[in-house]
Amino acid sequence: MISAAQKAHVRTIHPFPARMAPSIVWDCLPNSDRPKRILDPMAGSGTTLVCARAKGHYAIGYETDPLAFLIARTWCSDIDRVRVNNRAVIVLERAKILADKLDYHEAYPKGADEETRHFINFWFDNENRRQLTALSTCINRISSEDERIFLWCAFSRLIITKSTGVSLARDVSHSRPHKVYQTAPIHPFDKFLKAVEHVINNSPFHQSNKSVGRNPFADIHMGDARYLPINSNSIDMIITSPPYLNAIDYLRGHKLSLVWMGYRIAMIRGIRSENIGSEISDHPQLENTILEAIKAMGKLSDLNNRQMGMLRRYAYDMNSVLKECARVIKKNGNAIFVVGDSALHGVFIKNSDGLINLAVNHGFSLVSRVVRPIAENKRYLPPPNLQQTGEQLQRRMREEVILKFISNGKVERKDFTKMNTK
Ligand SMILES: C[S@@+](CC[C@H](N)C(=O)[O-])C[C@H]1O[C@@H](n2cnc3c(N)ncnc32)[C@H](O)[C@@H]1O
């Protein structure tokens, strides 16, 4: 179990849908005097990485969603509280001056194209658009990256909220934004310093606090779990929670923040279409081992062509992830996958059974399979057409499965530099 002192390391700095329970990570991480190399190839907000660093290990993470990457990197960074706080005060002062000079028709992030402006007009009212343009411009001008990332996280907290934020939407933090307001309930200038205070208070690694972690180190990158630029046989342990098939479209909510950081809608669409678990239907040529894994995922005869295409694509992608995990992990290293089962148009999809199948094909042996309830506030909401489905299916979707594997080391271990990536 996670102690009170350990909990202090895992207070969140920014909302994130389907975050992994920190207690799972704490219980899996070794208590070693010699730091281990711990990898999360689909790091999300960085729970594995923060816990690993706090326990004195080397934390290595990859992530494709730019907002998740920002959160993970910031959460794992050393903060100079006074410097960040002072910078926030200056940014707010300058933003107020800049906002006074901005006309509404020019109040958009630099480089925003027509589609992005249209999106911004839909989700933000004129006054908040002006204040967010001014704040984002002033954050962008900060030369120190160490300070900038903390302030971007605080900025994003104003937007990614459940009910009352600076956009016209509710449920952005669940990645299910829907427009409910005519004018936003909060103005960015009124809450910016409060958001900064939250990020500062919940940041676990302080430049002045030498007591946190032994040999603390975190190395986090934008990158794809299917093509890891990591040397073979170099990772001691993997702890990760892959996306479930079609369960959460992370970028749907994150878009509202990312447009202010310079991302155009078309760029975000491109990232989304590449993400594992998104509702993209594809019919790649599949090896027999992947077809076997698909069979293990449920009674699929009720799925139509498009849904079958989504499942094929998911299995294909997860197979690539497992292949990479098998390559980079050391012999006898443990890989822990926390997976939830999901439902595709009324058909129950056993992601966990598919994953076991794929993992075994890549030289992993299953050590344990533990089922635990997902806390109510961490569950994803089933799509509307599933809300009346049977009690048994509803119950199973409230559970997650912790799969622990050990690597037998019997896989081809070409070094990544010699491989054809993407
Ligand atoms: C269930 S979430 C991880 C949550 C994380 N364990 C946490 O506690 O915040 C899955 C993550 O996988 C990321 N992802 C999807 N496709 C990916 C890919 N090809 N490579 C790396 N990450 C990917 C998603 O953006 C999402 O953040």
Image (tube, helix red, strand yellow):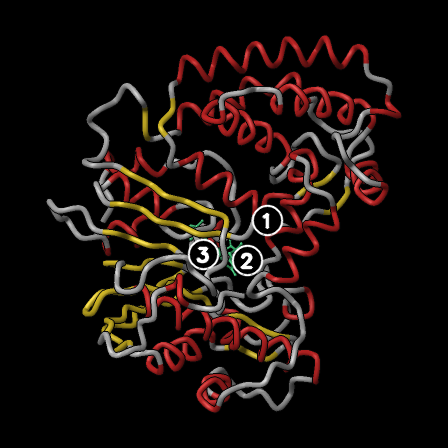
Q: Do labels 2 and 3 touch, CB within 8 Å?
A: no
Q: Position of residue 121 (x, y in %)?
A: 83, 36
Amino acid carrying label 1: it is: His
- Label 1 Cα neighbours within 10 Å, binned few <14 / some 14-19 / many ≥20: many
Quadrant of the snapshot with the C terminus: bottom right
Amino acid carrying label 2: it is: Tyr
Q: Do labels 1 and 2 touch, CB within 8 Å?
A: yes
Tell me if 329 is positioned left or right of 379 in this view. Answer: left
- Label 2 Cα neighbours within 10 Å, binned few <14 / some 14-19 / many ≥20: some
In the image, 92 versus 19, the foreground residue is 92
Q: Residue at x 47, y 14 (%)?
A: 85
340 in relation to 284, above or below: above
Q: Position of residue 236 (x, y in %)?
A: 23, 58
Residue 143 visible: yes
Q: Secondary structure at mark 3?
A: loop
In the picture, the disc for residue 174 is: 1
Mark closer to the chain start, 2 or 3: 3
Residue matched to label 2: 380
Residue matched to label 3: 42
